[in-house]
Amino acid sequence: MGSRHNRSSDSSDADDEGESLSSFDDDEYSDNESVQVPPRILSNHNSSNESDVRQPMARVTGTLIPGSFHRTWGNEVTSSRNDGFQPVTDYREVIRQQARELDVARAPKKKEDPIEKLFKPPRDIIFIGPWEGARDSAKDKKIWLLVNLQKNSEFACACLNRDIWRNDIVKSIVNSNFVLWQAGDDSSDCKRISVYYNIRTFPTIMIVDPRTGELVKLIKRFKNADTFTEDIMDFLGVFPDFESYDESIFLKYNPGKSKILVECERIAQEESAKKALEGAKEKDCATEETREQAADVAKQALLQKCLPSEPSATDKDIIIIRLRFPKGEQQIRRFRMDEQVKWLVAYCESLGYPTKSYRIFTSDVPKKEIATIDITKTFRELKWPTREQITIDS
């Protein structure tokens, strides 16, 4: 009985175990049907020692975004430290700037840094505005445009503000004869002007004709105020105004002729052409020599019309010139001390003594020929005496 019971019990346990195993297998099969495992995972699971496993990706470093969005796409407000009129497009920045200025105004004022004051731009003598405005201002005043291009990182540019533009003599000369325009390399005007005039070194000082934009002179000596003043005064001595510069350009391309004479020749040619048209119907029997004489007479008459009026003997600041002609005749002519010597030459030519055929000498010892003198200067500038004798020789 005991054995039977044990066998029965064992059989029952076996049945339970079989039933349990059968149930487990059914569940596992059911799970395999409901979950579809990728073939690659099954392959890796079944053959874990195979060599087709993908290697890890190599490490890569780099910048995903080169800069912030505001830096890349935002409207930045940039302005030159030397150029006071840069266009502003970011009005939010304007509001913030006004708020900062209001805070500064409310805050107790601090004493100005003496170092900053020493090297700051010469606001009292420079033109504040763009390049075109500076040219227009100089053109209206009929004075030269003095241009100073600076590089804000160069200490020599700061020294220029300290040693040159702060000098009282330099200020006086600049205010009387120039429109000074200064720009830093962080302004668009400075970059544009540097490219146009091929400027490669800073600081640069140059004199520009505001009418045409021509670079007239490049100032190279500005280590100290003395050398700078000397170069500026030398330039003004030769070209005090636009007229003297135009005269030099004319003489450069028309050597041996004065501008006034060429102008009179042009007028004479026009009048001669007019008379020729009017008298085309009449028979011309005059010889070539007669026509040349008539042209000379007409030229002399035109020169006399172009001459400035003769001052009276009682006027002040006059010079009395005694003219001695080749045949011994003499004549006296008065001029104003502030008139140019070229009018004396024009007067001699109006009397029939052109410079191409006659030589004019002063009373200096030894004699000095007027052809060697700068006739665009006045009698006062050349320090002529109030009484002078001129000799005309063939």
Image: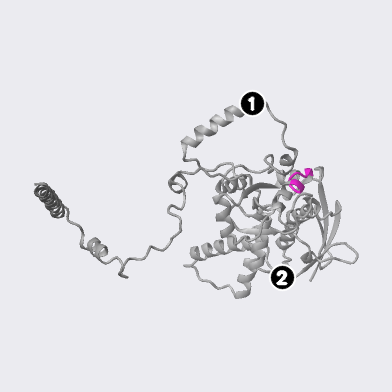
Q: Residue at x 73, y 67 (%)?
A: 355
Describe the element under mark 1 as helix, strand or loop: loop
Q: Where does the image place residue 237, in percent across and percent down from the top left?
A: 76, 55
Q: Nearer the viewer, residue 254 or 310?
A: 254
Q: From the image, state whether disc 1 or disc 2 is nearer to you.
A: 1
Between the C-alphas of marks 1 and 2, the distance is 77 Å
* 388 magenta-colored: no
Circle 1 is placed at which residue position? Answer: 107
**Residue 231 appearing in the image:** yes
Q: Nearer the viewer, residue 322 or 287?
A: 322
Which kind of residue does numbered mark 2 sit on? Answer: Lys
**Residue 300 appearing in the image:** no
Residue 287 position by quadrant: bottom right
Q: What's drawn in magenta, residue-wise?
A: 162-168
Which kind of residue does numbered mark 1 sit on? Answer: Ala
Q: Where does the image place residue 297, in percent across and percent down from the top left?
A: 65, 64
Classify residue 26 as left or right of residue 86. left
Q: Residue furthest front?
A: 1
Check the picture and name the quadrant holding the C terminus: bottom right
Q: Where does the image place residue 378, in percent across and percent down from the top left?
A: 77, 53
Tally of numbered tags: 2
Label of residue 98 in the image: none
* 165 magenta-colored: yes
Q: Where does the image place residue 120, in percent across and percent down from the top left?
A: 69, 42
Q: Residue furthest right?
A: 365
Q: Earlier in the sequence, mark 1 or mark 2?
A: 1
Classify residue 306 as left or right of residue 394. left
**Mark 2 nearby-residue class (10 Å; few <14, some 14–19, many ≥20):** few
Q: Residue at x 87, y 66 (%)?
A: 367
Classify residue 169 as left or right of residue 23. right
Circle 2 is placed at which residue position? Answer: 356
